[in-house]
Amino acid sequence: MTVQMTSLNSKTAIPRVAAEAVERERLADLLRYAGSNRLTIVRAPAGYGKTTMLSQWFGQSYEPVAWLSVDAIDNDPIRFWKYVIYTVSETFMSETDTTQFPLSNSHSPIELLIDSFLNEIGSVPRILRIVIEDYHLIDNQSIHDMLDRFITYLPSNVRVYMTSRTKLPLPIAKWRVKGWITEIGMEQLRFTYEEVERFYTKRGLMLRDVATVQQVLDTTEGWAAGIQLTSLSGSMTVADGRNSDLISSAHPFLIEFLSQEILASLPLSTQDFLIRTSLVNQLEPGICNTLTNRTDSENVLLELERSGLFITRLHASEPIFRYHHLFADALQIEMKNHYSDQEISLNYKKTAILLREQGDFISAIELALTGKLYEVADRWITAHILEVFLSGQTTTFMRWVQQLRDTDYRVNVETLIMNVITFTNIYAIEEAKQLIEELECRQVHEQWKQKDDYQGMAYILETVKAFVLIANCEDIERAIGIILSQMKIGRVISRWDDIPMQYNQFEPQTLRTSLGSKGKLWAVKEVLPFLDLFRESEFNEQNMTGFSYAVQAEALYEKDCVYEASIVLEEALRYGHRFKDPSLIVPMYLLKGRIYATKGQFIEAHALLDYAMETIKERYWISTLRTMKAYCYLLEGDSLRAELELYQSTAIHNQRVESGQEFWLLIQTRILLAKAQAKEALEVVGRVKEKALLERQISTIVEAGVLEAMCQLDLSDKEAALTALHEALKEGAPYGYVRTFLNEIRVIPLLKEYVKLRQQGIHAEWDSVPINYVERLTAEEVSESVRNPMLEKLTPRERDVLQLLVKGASNSEIASQLFLSEGTVRVYLSKVYSKLGVDSRTKAVLLANKWEWPDRSKVIK
């Protein structure tokens, strides 16, 4: 596994129930009666026996359970869900972890990870029980959103159990109304008189009389930890009138009680042992020996267990324990009260170093930050930054950096540069630009770029600056200047050279990525010099060059240069296979399949997509390919088969529009239109368009707008259809969108009517769209309807070449006007001669002069 999975014993083992634990059958009945409910929530303050209740219940069952104990450092979506997936996989002996981790190693949208995981566990032919303990420690909204989705679409064979001290930040009220949940709270967990009596009897404590039991019950209000505290103190009572404080964890009275009544009764050496080991989540004899400078830690741990202190054994066969969170909190407060700042800092440092030596660098860095050991934390972050990125825990990384920056600590340059890259990966371009400016300011004062240790990072930063300019569709000339300077310097070796950057996490179109400028198509004349730089330099060996081909191929297709797109996409595929990158391979197979389908070559399209599904392993990308097959069936006129294929692509039928699902939803819109369900289709496409507008995803805005116009046509609202079409044209015009309009045959008449209304001066507010742009679209449509058999043999770009040839243009002039090299022009001419059955330039011109040509001069860009 790529994520660091140390200390798994303490996180994934069902806590062992002490032999003296009271059997509470009434609580078992509550769990038994929960039956087939999706979710059981056990919520109460610390020390009410939430964990003991579930441990006893599952301990009596022969059925396996996937148990995950959450820690505060699990507030990273990737880390949290990898632990969940790993636990489920290990418990039920499935291959869930291997199929999910490639997807979760990046900034994948939460919906895709959860949907894929749901598909996996839904296919397991048995009941799966998953426990998430101490969820109150999670405060990351993304994790809450993921869990919301997880429960909402939970398969019928899965049951989830959660414990929390606080109210869960989840839609509990909605789930309660739906009858999905069982709730067990403080009132049910309180000890009864009989249970208190059995508690003391099991521990061999003599009770003076019935009144004593009642006094304990009244004073503690049935709070399990309070009852245990009274037994440990040997007093059979606690201070009167302060029971409400006792019930609240970490309140002054509780700490005072633990200190005066529990810790004070222990030998000083034991007190010191407890305090010095309180920072560790998993207590093992070897670790404790190192922290306490002792050799008898195993005996101490066993004695603490026998005494019934707040310690839980995790394994029957191994001496592995953990402190109750309540007790650990109290011990850490005790440390602050009685140890000097120097001693406390030393204990934090010693514990953190030990954790790092054990391989748990994540916990080590967290502890260093908590202990204000910022220099140590920064040094370790830099040392382990590669591992953090490879494991996908960039949320944790960004939080660490922010924690350091909040203290005005001067963070390591390499760490800041990787933070820039993280920002660009999640398309937080403004944040990336601000951090780049900060690094440039530090260069002025520190001259860090001139230092040998930072040469590689300086080179990377310059490359990232060019990337940001392209991603933000800003200054391509400046980007070219940066790359030229990089080429003069020559590539600088760094430890990041062998780490593949993730340019596309989940998008079926590379145009929707940062490299694709979110669908902002560059003019060919502007972008070609930049692309040539990549392909004719040392950058040619990088995966990024493959994505440059992919973006260019999709842009060429959109601009109706289909033949050129077909050539360029093959180059992109070559890189994709070389780097074994499905996020590059699949979008190119989708484009190739689309080209086949738009030509009516459906057999070839399905064969290609079937082949791709056989070779791609990741479930999400297979689902994406299935969605494309559904589109092909729809183009064939088989809406029934299209619908079957679409719903095979995913088991989740969502009403919400989530990142990565737009492709699926837009195909669903087309299927609904084919089924004469225009109202439902309009609802779906409206949500897609709304989200795309918020994200400024140009290609999706245009496509959704075109489909919205089709929906309005079917609803007999031509005015609304024209308005929707205008909005799509307004978004597409600045970037020269063509195919998105022409691929929808039913929109062509609406385009012509739009032109007619514009020519009549109606709708002056539509003047924001250049009329010649729309006229070019209708000219494209005319060119496609030409029925000259000889001309139809040629691709659109071959027609452009031939038309310029007829006008007397030389090879160099053709190359200049079409932004091609002269070598490419010669290749085109050779193909044209072959298709026309001629063997010379003159014969081709003579033949072509006999034809009636559509006016494509407006189309040539």
Image: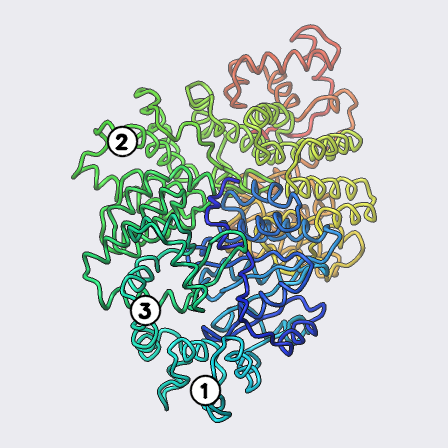
Could you tell me if residue 472 is visible in this image? no
Label 1 sits on what residue type?
Val
Q: Does 100 sit above or below residue 603?
A: below
Q: Earlier in the sequence, mark 3 or mark 1?
A: 1
Q: Is residue 500 left or right of residue 672?
A: left
* Residue located beneath label 2 in the image: 454
Residue located farthest toward the top when viewing the structure as drawn: 839
Q: Amino acid at mark 3?
A: Leu
Viewer-side residue, 514 vs 221: 221
Front of the two marks 3 and 1 = 3
- Which residue has dot 1 on it? 216
In the image, residue 271 sits, relative to residue 842, either above or below, namely below
Q: Residue at x 47, y 61 (%)?
A: 141
Question: Residue 2's mark?
Answer: none
Q: Residues within 10 Å of mark 2 (few under 14, many from 20)?
A: some
Identify the element where label 2 is drawn. helix
Whether residue 117 sits left or right of residue 637 in the image: it is left
